[in-house]
Amino acid sequence: MKYVAVLLLFSTLLMSGCYSQTGWTPTVDTYNDPNAYRINQDMAECRQLASQASNGLARETAMGAGVGGLLGAASGAAIGAIAGNPGTGAMIGATVGGLGGASKQGFESEAGYKRAYQNCLRNRGHRPIN
C-alpha cells in the first residue's frame, strides 16, 4: 500500500506539471478597441484574477487525485474481493482512480482559468478571440 501512495503522489505531481496556466494567453483583437493602449496592464491583471478564480491548478489536481484515489481504492477492493485479492484490487483501483481524478480536475481547472481570463478581458472592453 505504501507503493501506491508513492506512485499516486508521483503521478499527481507529473500530471500537474502537464497542465500549465501560465503558458496560455488569449489572443485579443485590438482593431477598433478604444482601450488598446491598456491591453498589457489589463492582461496582467486578468491573468492574476483568473488564477485566483480557478483555485490554483496544483491544488485542484491534488484534490482530484485524492478523491479519485479513494473512490478507485474502494471500487478496486470490491472487485478484488470478488476475484479473491482485495488488497491488489484496492492498489490498482487507487492508482487508476487517482490518475483519472487528477486529469479530470486539471482539465476543469484549466478551462475555468481560460474562461475567467477571457471574461475579465471582455469586461474591460477588449475582444478575446480564443
Image: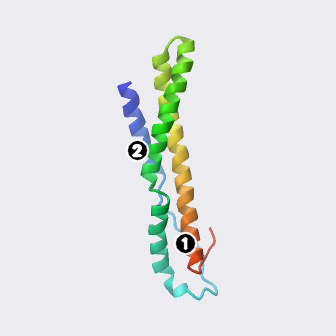
Indicate the position of residue 35 as horizontal and vertical percent values.
55, 86
Q: How is the image coloured?
A: rainbow
Which disc, if any, is residue 13?
2
Indicate the position of residue 37 as horizontal and vertical percent values.
51, 87
Up/down of 79 relative to 32, above or below: above
**Residue, x 45% and y 79% (percent of image)?**
41
Q: What element carries label 2?
A: helix
Q: In this view, does 129 lie to the left or right of 103?
A: right
Q: Can residue 26 be seen in this view?
A: no
Residue 118 location, quadrant: bottom right
- Name the amino acid type tagged 2: Leu
Residue 120 location, quadrant: bottom right
Label 2 to label 1: alpha-carbon separation = 29 Å
Up/down of 116 relative to 92, above or below: below
Q: Can residue 53 be seen in this view?
A: yes
**Residue, x 48% and y 30% (percent of image)?**
94
Indicate the position of residue 78 as horizontal and vertical percent values.
54, 20
Q: Is residue 51 left or right of residue 115?
A: left
Q: Residues within 10 Å of mark 1 (few under 14, many from 20)?
A: many
Q: Are marks 2 and 1 in contact (CB under 8 Å)?
A: no
Up/down of 13 relative to 96, above or below: below
User: Which residue extends farthest top?
Assistant: 84
Q: Residues within 10 Å of mark 2 (few under 14, many from 20)?
A: some
- Name the amino acid type tagged 1: Cys
The residue indicated by pointer 1 is 120
* In front: label 2 or label 1: 1
